[in-house]
Image (cartoon, rainbow, N blue to C red):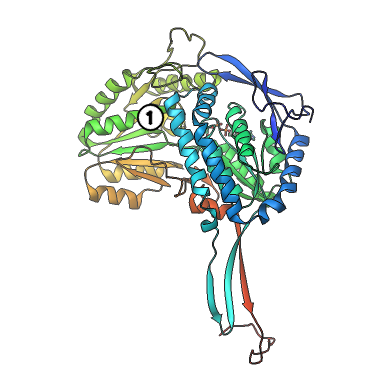
Amino acid sequence: MNHPNEKAVSQAGVSLWINGRAQVSTSTRVGEVTNPATGEVVRRVSFANAADIDAAVSAASAALPAWRDAPPLRRARVMQKFLAIMQANQKELAQLTSEEHGKTLPDALGSVQRGIEVIEFACGVPHLLKGEYTGNAGTGVDCHTLRQAVGVCAGITPFNFPAMVPLWMFPVSIACGNTFILKPSEKVPSTSMRMAELFKEAGLPDGVFNVVHGDKEAVEAILNHPGVHAVSFVGSTPIAKYIYETCARNGKRVQALGGAKNHAVVLPDADLEFTADALIGAAYGSAGERCMAISAVVAVGAIGDPLVKMLADKAAKIKVGAGDAEGVEMGPLVTMAHRDKVEGYVNIGVAEGAKLVLDGRNKKVPGHEDGFFIGTTLFDQVKSDMKIYKDEIFGPVLVVLRADTLEEAIALVNANPYGNGTAIFTNSGGAARRFEEEIQVGMVGVNVPIPVPMAFYSFGGWKASLFGDLHMHGMEGVKFYTRTKVVTTRWPHADTPTAGLNMPTLG
Ligand code: NAD
């Protein structure tokens, strides 16, 4: 730890945040952070090694007893100050998000807002931590439950929501009395550092919230550190599975959210224009780099042809450019490598025989020739055995499949290994109800294309989109970040029966 007290984010670089201070890693490994709209390296980020992770765990462990033992109301008051400071700095956080991720400023602002709503939820922690009580559970015996902090928690997050996904985790964890180590994506490190500074400004004691950066080396050090008790992860499915397995082997509590292929089923009775507008926003917003993006449309029956035509017309009009430019609706992809991968999928789709209705390859944005752009892309007549359907592309590529009936559409969605989000578009209450009942997906929209639950509900998918049991934020988040203790109490007096050798039955 060389330079305490330096700024968390400067033009020169992004440091680690340990024990309430910006610190530089003892490792010489750094990552380059690019502005995807210009292709320029905007800053470098210190990569943490095992010694840095150990320092973060030591700081979080030292801060734990006092923070855990503080009354929930005192912790809630820090959250309330944090809420106000985050609201006041929402624009700056959105600018940092947009600069490093590429998404448009209004979209970034919305995502920061959705994250701030989790802080709002966490402000209610005294209520959320209330336990259960049964008087006279047995003769002269009472029972109650306590929800207690798990300990030192860690969060490992993806590039696509630099503020929102970390905010799904750490406000709830910290409000519940835990201390936290966040390892954000090394592609977008600055927003987390700024949030750490703002949390300190709100009065959070040093060591309660720490931020480390890096890649596999930092993650492995977290997963293998005996001082870390719980790990929350959001990212791609192969890494989610590996995180889940490693944590389970190491005896840690774990929730690992993975990738997605989200379907929208459009029935013949759906309102065509309303549906097309909803799908355009859900498929191409944030350049398709959302875990809840609609990436596959299942058009049922006669609506297929007019829907594809309308989608193509609307998608072709989307203005692509730098995320901070006026009037731009879709920004670049996060890195050149990711842009090339997405373009590669378009080549694969053509080779597989899908009908390329709109081709976004070789997109050039004047004045931003080195940016990582790709235009809106639409495939029709896609089959379920094609790679462009089976893989998560994570770019502005929408594929349309055709089905004859609602049953066929439901079977198609349920056969997909992912189960994050889905939506049905229809005017039939009966069809919507059936879809809601039968679909094997964690988050379902009825005429709502991106059904991201509000902070007071929980976010999480099924199948290959979630390894673990509990979803994030809402009451499932509170459950994940607390351990339940059941206390059985008896106060002896003259007529209390004495304990015998048999199994007590409390009757
Ligand atoms: P990613 O899996 O590549 O990275 C996620 C995190 O894991 C990052 O912090 C990264 O540094 C770390 N990581 C990467 N490779 C690793 C390795 N080999 N060992 C250990 N750690 C490693 O994901 P990404 O590209 O940053 O984000 C996009 C993915 O995240 C998409 O698949 C998307 O669907 C998914 N995602 C899911 C949700 C959800 O709620 N289910 C939300 C957002 C994003």
What residue is at 72 percent from the left and 26 percent from the top?
6
Q: What kind of element bears circle 1? A: helix
Residue 65 against residue 114 in the figure, above or below: below
| Total marks placed | 1
Nearest the viewer among 359 and 66 is 66
Q: Mark 1 Cα within 10 Å, few/some/many (few <14, many 20+)?
A: many
**How far across and how far down the image is residue 220, in percent?**
70, 38
**How far across and how far down the image is residue 425, in percent?**
27, 40
Q: Quadrant of the N terminus?
A: top right
Nearest the viewer among 189 and 283 is 189
In the rendered structure, the answer to whether residue 320 lies left or right of residue 27 reads left
In the rendered structure, the answer to whether residue 347 lies left or right of residue 433 reads right
Location of mark 1 (residue) = 283
**How far across and how far down the image is residue 256, in percent?**
56, 44
Residue 89 against residue 500 in the figure, above or below: above
Q: Taking the image as four quarters, which one is ligand 1 found in?
A: top right
